[in-house]
Image (spheres, rainbow, N blue to C red):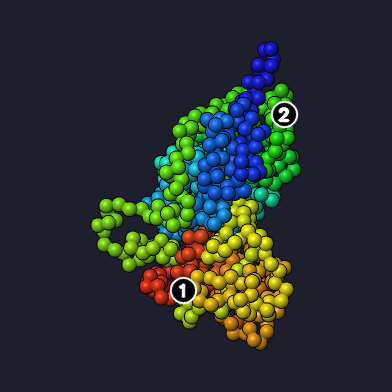
Amino acid sequence: MIEQTQHDSRRRSVLATLLPGFEGITLPTWLSARLAEGLGGVCLFGENVESLPQLAALTSAIREANPHAIIAIDEEGGDVTRLFYDIGSPYPGNAVLGRLDDLAQTEAVARAVGVALRGAGVNLAFAPDVDVNSNPNNPVIGVRSFGADAELVARHSAAWVHGLQSTGVAASAKHFPGHGDTAADSHRSLPVVDVPLEVLRARELVPFASAIAAEVRTIMTSHILLPHLDSEHPATLSSRILQGLLRTELGFDGVVVSDALDMAGASGSIGIPEAAVQALASGCDLLCIGTKNTDAQLAEVERALLAALDDGRLTGTRLGDAATAVRSLGAELAEAAVRPELAASAVRPESAESAVRPESAESAEAPESTDPRTATHLPEPARIAATFELNSEARAWLQNGPPDVVVRLHTVPNEAIGTVPWGPFAHLDEQAELREHANLRQHATAHDPHYAQFTPDAWHAANVITVTEKSAGPLKKLAADPDFTGSRIVVIGTANHLTPWVTRLIDRLRRSNSVLVIDMGWPAPDRRYADIATFGASRLVGEALLSLFAASNDATRTIMQHTHTYEGVVR
């Protein structure tokens, strides 16, 4: 009896450290049972969210099974969104906020995100991303970062933490100790950041220190290798990094959450159960298991952790500390229950947009600014458009009329973003299967079903073509057609320079057409494939982009006077 009681106690402690995901939009029976047994919480992903009422019902079921469960979600308020996974984010995103450099605005956006999350019953947001995006070839961070300057990122990280946590939703600064200087995606491989500790202290760690000073409740780890700190283990599995650097040097005393352990950077060579053992033993308190966990998979992780207790690889003290920290956080967040009146404020982008405009007595009395980045009388899209970077060719192109054709570059999205509708295309059905464009000559009419008509006042009669890697070849042939030569073409993609077939296609189109290339990701330093750089691809940023093409909009002329100019483009 005593042995069984001890086993049950240890298992409850193990369960308290686990944060699995699942497939579907309703709570599975196996997950409900574990929640009742003391499971730490549940991590929700885009596939779990069909609508905000459905999400509220789901989180209610989770809390019914365990009132102190942590209910976490990746909602960054930009390109990475889960609340608006079906329609695209109504928020600007971190890179745009960094370019606005208005701390009140950043805090207001974070507060709006928190209100939406709390209204839906979510009590932990895996945000803000406080990585310093020092590598423009970063395939997974990019516009999720506030910028490439450590001090700027630090300021906005603290503002985001304050705004989000003011709503009763816990924040999570990520990805410790910094994923910004990588050229690989830890979802698919193990990135290496080969810089000395002095560089980390001056760059990567600055925003984390700022978030800690702002009393961020949790910090998420990264699956990256830092040879100067630990040459054998990625950060998630390194006690030197988590216990030494994070706990001792930076003084963080909150909950340490692992990034998803199903990612290749953590478990690619050792498997999820072993990654769970090493992560917990090294200093993680709450283990995010992954997106599509199952009953059998979770049982395997439990067995591995219990076996590690038996053989001494995981101490009872470490397990107890982690379980206590998670339970304490869950208890404190328990009051963040579903509030339908708050959920209603996040139903559609229009209401969310109005929620992010900071209003104060001072701003009401202050004279109106002529700069759209600070002017309160201009609509939010206009204020965002003022942060865009345009070269001189783009400015001239925009003055010469609407496009004949709009080419949407459909590249494989990184796994953090997923299949969220993006940019000016967000209102289209992005989940529909992409058609193959075998004969693009037939697409010269707006009545072809492959085309979609855009907002009339911005795009007029322009035809919109969605191009994949497989369909890029036929488009190149069409570009050489004499009847097509001279067309005014807008090409829109994200981080264009990172995809070889995209750069080849753009080069081909430019040979015989008037082409305007728009990059809605983080552009290359030379801006060769970014006549316009928006530094974000949320639905709201897409609306801002459309405003540049709305020549009849009075605000547009003001925007054109204040957008950033870049003259270093290389052809």
Q: Which residue is mark 1?
A: 457
Mark 1, residues whose alpha carbon is within 10 Å: few (<14), some, or many (≥20)?
Answer: some
Give the distance between the C-alpha atoms of the residues marked 1 and 2, in whole angstroms: 61 Å
Q: Amino acid at mark 2?
A: Arg
Q: Position of residue 325 (x, y in %)?
A: 53, 29
Kindly state the secondary structure of the residue where label 2 is placed. Answer: helix
User: Residue at 61% of width from left, 51% of height from top?
Assistant: 416
Please, which residue is most extreme toward the bottom here? 482
Where disc 1 sits, the SS reads helix
Residue that carries the numbered disc 2 in the rendered image: 303
Of mark 1 and mark 2, the one earlier in the sequence is 2
Numbered badge on residue 54: none
Which amino acid, by three-letter code, is at mark 1? Answer: Asp
Residue 562 lies, in percent from the top left, at: 39, 69
Q: Quadrant of residue 79?
A: bottom right
The answer to the question of whether label 1 and label 2 lie on touching residues, with beta carbons closer than 8 A, is no
Residue 279's x, y, as percent?
Answer: 64, 35
Residue at x-position 41% and y-position 61%: 380
What residue is rendered at 65% in x and 69% in y? 467
